[in-house]
C-alpha cells in the first residue's frame, strides 16, 4: 500500500484483535487458570434472609476427605476486615460489609463460611457438612415498607433502614402544577433483575509470603480500583498487589464491584501463603448473591399546558439497595442517578424529586448497565404517554414539543447536570423515518377493522451521560473521582507498537478500539498495533469499565499518547535526516516530508536507532520511544437515542410479539461500526430482557423464588427481534469525538414495551415486567371468567 | 452446583441395568439423556448412590410403526421423534422440547419417567392412550399412560424398574398447542388432542400434577367452542410465578380451541401410510 492509499482505521470495521482468541475457543478466562498447588473454595451461604449467627460448626466439614480448612467471619485472618462504602453526602449512613458474615446474616445467599479443598466437588461436599445455627430475625424485603413496621433493622446504624435520601429541587412545582391544564398521576414499580454475564464471577488469589506479594486474577471490570481497595483492606502496599483481569465473559456493571467473596478469597490466600485459591461462582450463587438492580417504586405527578408543554414533575422514588451499601459505589448509586436523570431529554423548569436508598434483607443492588435509567425512562415516558392521552395528543408530537433542542445547548437540567447533546430530535426524526410510523399506524387501523390481533407503537427517547469527567459528578461524593484514564504507547525496537491501556474489556472489543485510535494518532497500520489491557503491572492507570466511559476517556488517553509518541518519532526522524520537523508526517509507519510520496525514513529504523544504536542518537535525545498520557474530559459526553417499536398483543393468551424495533443513537464519531452496533444491539436485548422476562422475585420471608435460569428467564436469540439500528453522528468535544455507547440501548425498552401496550389496548401498565400473564390480567381484570 | 458423590455403572443389557438397580437397593437411578437428572444432581436435590448408564445398552433405539402403534425404544432421542413422520402428533410436540442440544440428548422414555407435568411427551402419551414397557427383577410389564403418572415427578415405576420401550397409538386426527414464556421453555399450558374413531382425548399439561385428561365424543368444527369451555371448566390449576389460576384456565380454553381447531379442520395432517 502506498502512503497515499493509507486510510484511517477509525470508522472501518477492521478485524477485531480479539477474534482469533474468542471465536476459536481459545480465550483465557479466570476459570481456565490452573496453577501448581492450587486449591478450590466453596462458600457456605445463608438459607435465611435475616438471622443472628449463633454458631458455625465446621468439624464435620473438616472430616471430609480432601477438605483442608474452613474459614468463618470470626477467623483471625478475616475478623478485622470490613468493606465500607464511603460517601460525603449529607445524611448518608455508612455501614460495614464483612467478607464473611459476622454476628448476623442480612440476606439469603450471604457467605457465612469458606471451605478450602482439593477440588470444587470436595469443597461443596465440605460446605454441605458445615452446620450453622441461625436465630431468625424479622426480614424486610420491600423497600417501600412503612418504616414504622421495621422491628429488626438490617443495620443498627439505620433503624428505619434508610441509608440515603436526597431531594432535587428546581423552580416552583406547586405553583406550576396549580397552573397546569392537565395533571397526570402514575404509580410505578420496576422489576428487580441483574446483569447475568455468561461468565459468572471468578477469582484466583495467590500470596507469596517471602516478598509479601499478592496476585489476584479476577474477572473484574475495574482492576486498578480493585488493587487500590485491596491494598487498603489488606494493609499491603499498592505496589505489592497485582490484579489481572484476563479475558472476561461479560460484566454489565455486575463486575464493577469489589465483592466480599473477593476480599475473603484474598484474605484466605494470605493466611495460606504459597497455595493459590480458586473460586468460580456458579449460576445459583450468581442469582443469589451477585448484585441485583432496578427494584424501584416511583410515585409521580406531572402537569402539562394545553399545548402539550411539560410544566412540572414531582416524584417520590424508592430504590431497594439490598442488604449492603455496595462497595465502593454506595447505596446512592441507583437513587442519585434516578433523581439526577429522571427528566431525561425533556426541558423542564419545575422539578421536585425525593429519592431514597432503602436497605432490605435481599442481595445488594449495584451498578447494572444503564444504572436506574431503564426505570426512570419508563417513568418519564409513562408520564408523557398519560399526558398525551389526557390531552388527546399524538405521543410523538407531545415528545417533540418538550425535547431539548440544539438551540438550548448547553442545557442545564433541573438536577443541574449540563446536557451537551441536543441530538434528541435528530435521533427521533431519523427513527420515525426508518421505522415508518405512518406505515405502522395504517397497519394498526387495518388490524382494528379486520378484528386481528392489535398492534401498538411504543416510543422511548433518552439521554445517556457517558464518559464522566471530574466535574460531572453524578456519583455520590466518594473518596475517589473517576474522571481520567492513562495510556502508554511504546514503539518497540522493531517498529511495531505495544499499547498499555488502562481500559478493560468484558467482550466489547476494547483492544480493537484502542488499536484503531492509536494507529491513527501515531500514524501506523492497525495491524502494527498490539494492545495490552487488564493487568495492573502493565498499564499505569484506568478506572475501568462503567458509565460508558472507556471509548471516551480511555480512547482520549490512547489518542493523546499516540500523538505524543508521533511527535517524538518525527523529532528524532527530523534530527536524523536533518529535515525541519514541522515539514514531516508519519503515515503507515513511514516518515514523509509532507506532499512527497517517497518516505525519508521508516518508523522501524527510527526505533532501531532509539533502542539499539545510541551511536546514531542525535544530541539531546534520550534512548527509547514511548510516552504516557492521561485524559480527563472534565465534564462528560451526553449521548442521545430514540427507539420505536411495533408490538403485537394477543388478547387471548397475553402473548407479546415484537414485529419491528428501530433504534437511532448519536454515538458521536464511530470508531468501529460493527462494535458500536453490537453494543447497541446487546444493550437493547438486555433492555428487552428486563422489560419482558427477567425478574428476581423474593417471597415474603426473603427467599429468592427465581433461583435458577428455569425461573429467571433470560431472553435468547429466539426472543430478540431483528433490530434495525441507525445513527446520527455528532462528534463530541473530546480528542476522538466519540460518545459512549455501552448502555444507551438498555434505557428505552421498558418504556417502549409499556407504551406499545397502552397504544394497542388502551390499558396502562404500572408494574414491570410486561409478561403475557400481566397483559392478560390487565385486559381481563384478573377475575376468573 | 457440583454433583454429590455416586457410583457409576455402565449397563451392558437391560438385565444388567436391572441387576445394577437391585444392587443399589433403592438408591439407584437410570441415566439416559441426563437432561433432567444431571441438573437435579448438580443442585443436590437428588443424591442417588448409583447411576446406571443405559446409553450403551444395545437394541433400545427402535423407532417403528406396527399395527397402528409407534414403538420407540428407551434410547430414542427427542430429535428422532421430532424428525419422524410416522406419528405427526408426537413429532409436532417433540419440536417444542427445549433446544437442539437438549433434543439431541434427551430421551422420550426419560421424559416420561421424569413425569414433569408441564412436559410435552407425558401429555402426548396420555392423549394417545399409550403405554410404556418396563423391565424389572420380576420380569417385564406394560404400564398404560393412565396409570403411569401418579403426581408431579411421580410415576408407577418401581425403584428397580427401567422403561424399555414406549407405545404411542396413531390417532386418526390430532392437534397440539402450547404456550411457553420463551422458545424451548416448559409449557405454561399445553394441550394435546387426539381422535381415535369417534372418541376424542384432550390432555392438558401444566394445570395439575399429572397431564389432565378430558374425553369427548367426536367433535365437529361446531363443537370446538363448547368442548374448549368444558375442558377449561374441568381443570383446576394453581397460581405460580408465570400466571394465576384464572390465566391458566383462560390459556387452557384458548389452546384447547386451537388444538381442536387443528384436529377438526383441514389443517390436521393425515397420517402417513404405514410402511409396507
Image (cartoon, grey):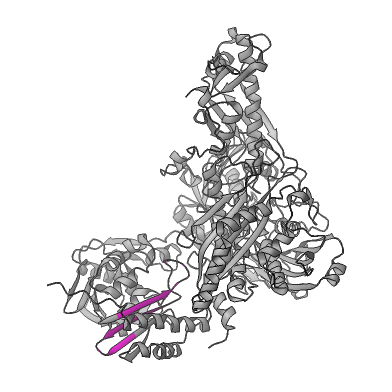
Magenta span of residues: B174-201
Along the line of sight, which residue is nearer the eye, A603 or B167? Answer: A603
Which residue corresponds to the image point at 28% horizontal and 85% vertical from the top-left? B195
Magenta part, dominant SS: strand
Which residue corresponds to the image point at 63% horizontal and 15% vertical from the top-left? A572
- The image position of residue B86, as x and y in percent, is 22, 72
Question: Which residue lies most toward the left here?
Answer: B276
Quarter of the image holding residue B63? Answer: bottom left
- What count of labels does the image hold? 0
Question: As drawn, is B138 to the left or to the right of A85?
Answer: left
- The image position of residue A289, as x and y in percent, is 59, 60
Q: Is residue A202 magenta?
A: no
Q: Is residue B181 magenta?
A: yes
- The image position of residue A199, as x and y in percent, is 51, 52
Residue A88, can we see it?
Answer: yes
- Is A441 drawn above or below residue A592 in the view shown? below
- The image position of residue B200, as x and y in percent, is 31, 87
Amino acid at each position: 500500500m502506498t502512503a497515499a492509499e493509507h486510510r484511517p482505521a477509525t470508522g472501518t470495521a477492521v478485524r477485531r484483535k480479539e477474534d482469533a482468541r474468542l471465536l476459536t475457543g481459545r480465550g483465557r478466562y479466570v476459570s481456565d487458570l490452573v496453577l501448581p498447588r492450587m486449591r478450590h473454595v466453596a462458600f457456605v451461604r445463608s438459607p435465611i434472609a435475616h438471622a443472628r449467627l449463633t454458631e458455625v460448626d465446621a468439624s464435620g466439614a473438616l472430616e471430609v476427605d480432601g477438605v483442608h480448612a474452613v474459614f468463618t467471619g470470626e477467623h483471625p485472618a478475616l475478623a478485622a476486615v470490613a468493606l465500607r462504602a464511603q460517601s460525603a453526602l449529607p445524611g448518608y449512613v455508612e455501614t460495614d460489609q464483612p467478607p464473611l458474615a459476622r454476628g448476623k446474616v442480612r440476606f439469603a445467599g450471604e457467605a457465612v463460611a469458606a471451605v478450602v479443598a482439593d477440588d470444587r466437588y470436595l469443597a461443596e461436599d465440605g460446605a454441605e457438612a458445615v452446620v450453622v445455627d441461625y436465630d431468625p430475625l424479622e426480614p424486610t424485603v420491600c423497600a417501600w415498607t412503612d418504616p414504622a413496621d421495621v422491628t429488626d433493622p438490617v443495620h443498627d446504624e439505620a433503624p428505619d433502614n434508610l441509608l440515603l435520601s436526597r431531594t432535587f429541587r428546581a423552580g416552583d412545582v406547586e405553583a406550576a402544577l396549580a397552573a397546569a391544564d392537565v395533571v397526570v398521576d402514575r404509580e410505578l414499580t420496576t422489576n428487580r433483575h441483574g446483569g447475568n454475564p455468561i461468565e459468572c464471577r471468578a477469582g484466583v488469589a495467590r500470596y507469596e509470603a517471602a516478598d509479601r506479594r499478592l496476585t489476584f486474577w479476577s474477572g473484574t471490570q475495574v482492576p486498578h480500583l480493585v488493587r487500590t481497595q485491596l491494598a487498603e483492606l489488606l494493609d499491603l502496599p499498592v505496589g505489592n498487589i497485582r490484579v489481572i483481569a484476563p479475558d472476561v465473559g461479560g460484566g454489565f456493571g455486575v463486575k464493577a464491584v469489589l465483592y466480599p467473596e473477593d476480599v475473603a478469597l484474598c484474605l484466605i490466600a494470605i493466611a495460606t501463603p504459597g497455595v493459590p485459591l480458586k473460586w468460580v461462582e456458579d449460576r445459583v450463587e450468581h442469582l443469589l448473591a451477585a448484585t441485583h438492580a432496578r427494584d424501584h417504586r416511583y410515585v409521580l405527578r406531572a402537569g402539562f399546558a394545553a399545548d402539550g408543554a411539560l410544566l412540572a414533575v414531582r416524584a417520590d422514588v424508592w430504590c431497594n439497595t439490598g442488604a449492603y451499601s455496595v462497595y465502593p459505589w454506595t447505596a446512592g448509586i441507583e437513587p442519585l442517578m434516578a433523581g439526577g436523570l429522571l427528566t431525561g431529554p425533556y426541558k423542564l423548569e419545575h422539578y421536585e424529586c425525593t429519592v431514597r436508598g432503602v436497605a432490605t434483607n435481599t442481595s445488594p443492588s449495584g451498578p447494572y448497565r444503564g444504572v436506574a435509567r431503564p426505570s426512570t425512562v419508563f417513568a418519564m415516558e409513562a408520564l408523557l404517554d398519560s399526558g398525551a392521552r389526557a390531552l388527546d395528543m399524538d405521543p410523538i408530537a407531545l415528545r417533540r414539543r418538550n425535547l431539548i433542542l440544539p438551540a438550548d445547548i448547553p442545557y442545564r437540567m433541573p438536577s443541574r447536570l449540563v446536557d451537551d447533546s441536543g441530538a434528541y430530535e435528530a435521533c427521533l426524526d431519523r427513527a420515525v423515518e426508518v421505522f415508518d410510523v405512518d406505515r405502522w399506524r395504517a397497519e394498526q387501523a387495518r388490524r382494528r377493522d379486520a378484528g386481528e390481533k392489535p398492534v401498538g407503537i411504543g416510543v422511548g427517547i433518552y439521554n445517556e451521560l457517558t464518559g464522566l469527567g471530574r466535574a460531572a459528578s453524578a456519583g455520590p461524593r466518594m473518596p475517589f473521582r473517576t474522571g481520567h484514564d492513562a495510556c502508554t504507547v511504546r514503539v518497540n525496537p522493531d517498529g511495531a507498537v505495544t499499547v498499555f491501556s488502562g481500559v478493560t474489556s468484558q467482550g466489547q472489543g476494547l483492544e480493537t478500539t484502542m488499536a484503531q485510535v492509536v494507529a491513527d494518532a501515531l500514524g501506523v497500520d492497525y495491524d502494527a498495533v498490539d494492545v495490552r489491557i487488564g493487568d495492573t503491572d502493565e498499564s499505569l492507570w484506568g478506572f475501568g469499565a462503567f458509565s460508558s466511559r472507556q471509548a471516551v476517556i480511555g480512547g482520549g488517553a490512547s489518542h493523546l499518547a499516540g500523538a505524543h509518541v508521533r511527535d517524538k518519532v518525527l523529532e528524532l526522524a527530523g534530527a536524523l535526516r536533518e529535515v525541519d520537523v514541522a515539514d514531516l508526517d508519519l503515515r503507515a509507519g513511514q516518515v514523509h516530508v509532507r506532499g512527497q510520496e517517497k518516505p525519508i525514513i521508516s518508523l522501524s529504523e527510527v526505533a532501531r536507532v532509539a533502542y539499539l544504536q545510541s551511536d546514531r542518537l542525535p544530541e539531546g535525545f534520550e534512548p527509547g520511544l514511548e510516552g504516557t498520557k492521561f485524559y480527563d474530559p472534565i465534564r462528560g459526553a451526553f449521548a442521545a437515542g430514540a427507539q420505536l417499536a411495533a408490538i403485537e398483543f394477543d388478547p387471548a393468551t397475553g402473548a407479546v410479539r415484537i414485529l419491528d424495533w428501530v433504534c437511532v443513537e448519536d454515538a458521536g464519531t464511530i470508531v468501529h461500526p460493527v462494535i458500536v452496533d453490537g453494543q447497541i444491539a446487546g444493550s437493547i436485548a438486555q433492555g428487552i430482557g428486563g422489560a419482558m422476562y427477567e425478574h428476581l422475585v423474593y417471597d415474603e420471608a426473603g427467599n429468592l423464588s427465581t433461583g435458577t435460569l428455569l425461573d429467571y428467564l433470560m431472553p435468547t436469540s429466539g426472543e430478540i427481534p431483528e433490530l434495525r439500528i441507525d445513527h446520527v453522528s455528532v462528534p463530541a468535544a473530546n480528542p476522538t469525538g466519540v460518545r459512549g455507547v455501552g448502555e444507551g440501548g438498555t434505557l428505552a425498552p421498558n418504556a417502549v414495551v409499556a407504551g406499545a401496550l397502552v397504544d394497542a389496548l388502551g390499558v396502562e401498565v404500572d408494574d414491570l415486567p410486561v409478561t403475557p400473564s400481566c397483559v392478560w390480567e390487565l385486559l381481563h381484570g384478573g377475575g376468573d371468567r | 452446583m457440583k454433583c454429590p458423590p455416586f457410583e457409576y455403572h455402565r449397563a451392558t443389557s437391560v438385565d444388567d441395568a436391572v441387576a445394577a438397580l437391585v444392587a443399589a437397593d433403592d438408591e439407584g437411578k437410570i441415566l439416559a439423556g441426563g437432561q433432567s437428572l444431571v441438573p437435579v444432581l448438580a443442585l443436590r436435590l437428588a443424591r442417588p448412590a448409583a447411576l446406571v448408564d443405559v446409553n450403551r445398552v444395545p437394541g433400545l433405539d427402535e423407532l417403528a410403526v406396527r399395527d397402528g402403534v409407534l414403538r420407540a425404544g428407551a434410547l430414542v432421542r427427542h430429535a428422532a421423534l421430532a424428525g419422524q413422520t410416522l406419528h405427526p402428533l408426537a413429532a409436532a410436540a417433540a419440536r417444542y422440547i427445549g433446544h437442539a442440544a437438549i433434543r439431541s440428548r434427551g430421551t422420550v422414555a426419560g421424559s416420561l419417567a421424569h413425569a414433569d407435568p408441564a412436559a410435552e411427551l407425558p401429555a402426548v402419551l396420555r392423549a394417545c392412550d399409550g403405554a410404556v414397557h418396563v423391565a424389572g427383577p420380576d420380569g417385564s410389564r406394560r404400564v398404560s399412560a393412565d396409570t403411569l403418572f401418579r403426581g408431579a415427578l411421580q410415576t408407577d415405576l418401581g425403584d428397580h424398574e427401567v422403561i424399555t420401550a414406549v407405545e404411542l397409538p396413531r390417532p386418526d386426527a390430532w392437534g397440539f398447542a402450547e404456550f411457553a414464556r420463551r422458545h424451548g421453555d416448559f409449557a405454561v399450558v399445553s394441550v394435546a388432542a387426539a381422535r381415535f374413531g369417534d372418541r376424542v382425548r384432550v390432555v392438558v399439561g401444566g394445570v395439575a400434577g399429572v397431564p389432565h385428561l378430558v374425553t369427548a365424543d367426536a367433535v365437529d368444527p361446531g363443537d370446538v367452542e363448547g368442548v374448549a369451555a368444558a375442558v377449561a371448566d374441568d381443570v383446576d390449576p394453581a397460581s405460580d410465578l408465570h400466571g394465576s389460576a384464572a390465566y391458566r384456565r383462560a390459556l387452557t380454553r384458548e389452546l384447547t380451541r386451537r388444538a381442536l381447531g387443528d384436529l377438526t379442520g383441514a389443517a390436521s395432517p393425515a397420517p402417513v401410510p404405514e410402511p409396507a
